[in-house]
Amino acid sequence: MRLCSFVANGRASYGLVTDTGIVDAGRRLAAPSLKQALADLPALAKLAGEKPDHGLDAVQWLPVIPDAGKVFSVLLNYEALRLEAGRPKLQFPHLLTRFADTQVGHKAALIKPKISNEFDFEGELAVVIGKPGRNIARAAAMEHVAGYACYNDATPRDWMRHSRHFTLAKSFPGTGGFGPWLTTRDALPDLSKSTLTTRLNGEIMQQAQLGNFTYPVEELISYISQATPLNAGDVICTGTPGGCGYKRSPPRFLKPGDDISVSIDGIGTLSNTVAEEA
């Protein structure tokens, strides 16, 4: 099952994505947003046979969870990237946070900050929590996952050098691409066999199997939940593989007019353009 958030005819809603369109679940269910609807996935599944209300090209795609309570980013979660960056192996996952209002949806423009000349792409798998929990055991962690989406955790690299803490570098408006939709966990039972690919203007920049995580999804969920409760709609961006623009020779940073996409087998393709900050 594929679930999305969108705007159609000036109204924000959420629904089921089919090959021919979107079934508007927001018109049929009491939950005000997809975040709340994740508590009852069977109710969403019952709408699978309904006739689509909107064409796929007739909506404005929103971030999958526009009102996410927590958005985490994981650093150096692929061995290839750690070696590329020349960093020592960490004893624990290194986590950052991103604000929900920095995100944009599928086909929207990522916004290059005027103050940055090093706007970089970071293709990632996003894990969306469906079942709340605290101190979650690793063995039970996947029971708390609603599904997966593609994410472009784009970052002004020059701002990451301002401090040892990277929160502000992840806080620029319009820098987190999140979409196109959430693919529920039952549709992708073995993540390790999926490949993530990031393309810049059609050229492959990043490619890695999700089975090459340093810290698997189960470990991330268990670790994060020891510090803070995880709630439905919370998002864990699991880290980007090697090939980021800042490590290329010469560097390849995003510029206005670029097309950038993140594809994950079994999930879909998140496509964004790049625009200059107004």
Image (cartoon, helix red, strand yellow):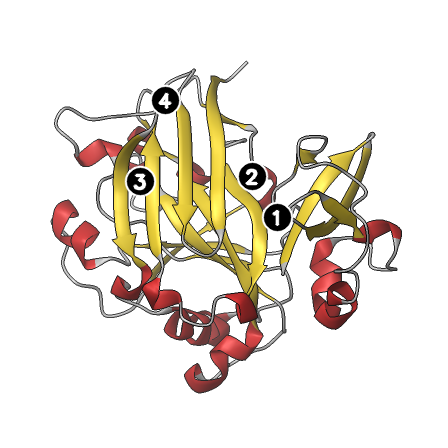
Taking 35 as reference, is 149 left or right?
Answer: left
Q: Mark 3 or mark 2, which has the lower sequence index? A: 2
Task: Say which quadrant the C terminus sits in.
Answer: top right
Q: Mark 3 or mark 1: which is in front?
A: 1
Q: Secondary structure at mark 3?
A: loop
Instruction: Please name the residue that numbered disc 2 is placed on.
Output: 103
Instruction: Please name the residue that numbered disc 3 is placed on.
Output: 163
Taking 74 as reference, is 6 left or right?
Answer: right
Question: Which dot marks residue 64?
Answer: 1
Q: Position of residue 259 (x, y in %)?
A: 41, 25
Q: CA distance from mark 4 to mark 3?
A: 15 Å
Amino acid tagged 1: Val
Q: CA distance from mark 3 to mark 1?
A: 30 Å
Q: CA distance from mark 4 to mark 1?
A: 27 Å
Q: Secondary structure at mark 4?
A: loop
Q: Residue at x 88, y 55 (%)?
A: 28
Tag 3 and tag 2, C-beta contact below 8 Å? no
Q: Secondary structure at mark 1?
A: loop
Amino acid tagged 2: Gln
Q: Mark 4 or mark 3, which has the lower sequence index? A: 4
Q: Residue at x 74, y 49 (%)?
A: 14
Amino acid tagged 4: Ser
Tag 3 and tag 1, C-beta contact below 8 Å? no
Q: Residues within 10 Å of mark 2 (few under 14, many from 20)?
A: many
Instruction: Please name the residue that numbered disc 4 is placed on.
Output: 116
Q: Residues within 10 Å of mark 1 (few under 14, many from 20)?
A: many
Tag 2 and tag 1, C-beta contact below 8 Å? no
Q: Mark 2 or mark 1: which is in front?
A: 1
